[in-house]
Amino acid sequence: MKRRSWFLNLSATAGFIFLYAPIVALIVYSFNKSKLVTVWGGWSLKWYTELFNNEQIIEAAWLSVKIAFISASLAVVLGTLAGYAMSRFGPFRGKMILSGWVTAPLVMPEVITGLSLLLLFVAMERIFGWPSGRGTGTIIIAHTTFCMAYVAVIVQARLSSMDESLEEAAMDLGARPSSLFFLVTLPLIAPAIISGWLLSFTLSLDDLVIASFVSGPGNSTLPMVIFSKVRLGVTPEVNALATLMILIVAVGVIAAMYQMRRQARLLERLDNN
């Protein structure tokens, strides 16, 4: 047991070092005074100042956040409806086709998805005259398309594991279908919807391949800007940007863990009383 425990601890330590050592190095080198990333020139906040003065990165960041917020919100609405239909409507004609269409983006390579959407937008522009050029709107449509699949799967899984007797009791008490959905079902699947929204927001904010196909001039998202800069060599500005993103994520995770522990303690106190 001691030998096995020693091996597990060593393996876990090596795994954590492999995962987090590059992140720690990135954070340290974001304070590097030298312009060369691989040469240490002393501590400085110079590149953070340069980052906030870089209008291209700031505009790309705001554009990415806006696209991610809208795409995640649309994906939650459409994905929830799709997941509810596949889980609660029972067998109906075309259910297998609907399920295949909804979940196809999960297994489709991003290059194929981006190329197919590009061809779709080009064909629509020729036939209907819309969209007139590619830009923010086409990126939102593309991101909503593949994010909706993740939301649908999460919501369907939650509905499948939920006790249907709660909905049956509400219907026995006279609840109409609309009231049943908004007052009973929706609060019960709210954690799944929130998880789907957060996952969709992250996927949209992080997407590079699909956005590269469906974006137009002057509509570069933050991953596209970072990728264009990295191709010419990693700059300390990119390190500073990555450090700020890591800080934001860390604060969000800590706040969520604190809230979860607070709710757990509150429930424990109520149970004890």
Image (cartoon, rainbow, N blue to C red):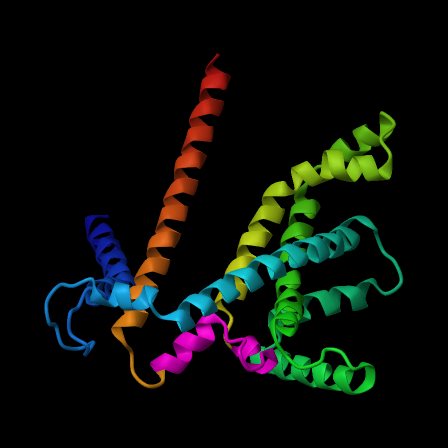
Task: Please name the residue shown 81% across and 35% down the image.
Answer: 179
Q: Name the one closer to the observer, 216 or 86.
A: 216
- Direction from residue 14 to residue 64 in the image, left or right: right
State how many labels appear. 0
Residue, x 21% and y 57% (percent of image)?
Answer: 10
Q: Is residue 114 above or below residue 184?
A: below
Find the residue positioned furthest to the top. Answer: 273
Residue 136 horizontal/vertical position (percent): 61, 71
Residue 103 picture location, percent across and down: 68, 66
Q: Confirm whether the magenta stretch covers residue 224.
A: yes
The answer to which quarter of the image holds residue 120 is bottom right
Where 260 sits versus 227, above or below? above
Tell whether 13 sits left or right of 128.
left
**Image coordinates for residue 61, horizontal then vertical, percent:** 45, 65
Foreground of the two, 266 or 5: 266
Q: Residue at x 23, y 64 (%)?
A: 21
Residue 189 inside the magenta-drawn segment:
no
The part of the chain drawn in magenta is: 209-230
**Vertical relation: 152 (above or below) 257:** below
Q: Quadrant of residue 229?
A: bottom left
* Secondary structure character of the magenta stretch overall: helix
Left or right of 264: which side holds 154? right
Residue 149 x %, y %: 65, 63
Residue drawn at point x = 58 percent, y = 53 percent: 197
